[in-house]
Image (spheres, rainbow, N blue to C red):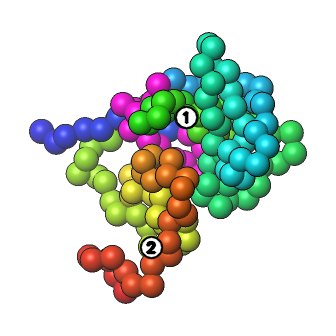
Amino acid sequence: MSAERQLCTFTLDGLSLGIDVRQVQEVMTHREMTRVPRAAPVIRGLINLRGQIVPALDLRRRLKLNEAPVGWLPMSVVVQCGDGPVSLLVDEIGDVVQVAEEDFERRPETLTGVARELIEGAYKLEGQLLLVLDTARVLQLDREPAARTRPAKGEAE
């Protein structure tokens, strides 16, 4: 019997992404945000979550994807980190899917830049490729992932 993993899925700029369901506190529809002057560009604002102030991180900007269209009303995947909850802003929330660990594949070679550093790997699902985010790295805003000059051990040149 193979080990299985549950992933909370969502879409972002046409990509199917997922994170381990154990990291997810909750998912929410669009919430009004309060802008934070001089915050990093990836921080869209603050959300009031039942009296708790939660930073809202724009995953499009974090992954250096296309800017959101005018009128974009993002949904939130609230995850727990060491400093408390953080809202990851996404286009649409999907389902919780169960995948076999043996089906996990290394990140696609076609990924470049920041996305290459923030994606753990992928699962091939029926009709789609589900990219798995490394949530811990996504939340490390104090440094941008550095582009490698040489492939990591075990990666193709």
Q: Indicate the quadrant containing the C terminus: top left, top right, bottom left or bottom right.
A: bottom left
Q: Nearer the viewer, residue 157 or 54?
A: 54
The residue beneath circle 2 is 109
- Residue displayed at 46% across by 64% down: 117
Q: Indicate the quadrant containing the N terminus: top left, top right, bottom left or bottom right.
A: top left
Under mark 1, the amino acid is Val
The residue beneath circle 1 is 86
Inter-mark Cα distance, 1 to 2: 29 Å
Residue sitting farthest toward the left: 1
Instruction: Give the mark, 1 or 2, whose residue is nearer the N terminus.
Output: 1
Q: Are marks 1 and 2 in contact (CB under 8 Å)?
A: no
Q: Is residue 37 left or right of residue 135?
A: right
Residue 106 in view (yes/no) = yes
Q: Is residue 127 left or right of residue 107?
A: right
- Residue displayed at 48% across by 58% down: 118
Badge 1: residue crowd in 10 Å (few <14, some 14–19, many ≥20)? many
From the image, give the main secondary structure of the stretch colored magenta: strand
Under mark 2, the amino acid is Glu
Q: Work out whether 10 lies above or below 115.
A: above
Residue bounds of the magenta highlight = 10-25
Q: Position of residue 155 (x, y in %)?
A: 32, 77
Q: Position of residue 53 (x, y in %)?
A: 63, 24
- Residue displayed at 27% across by 43% down: 100
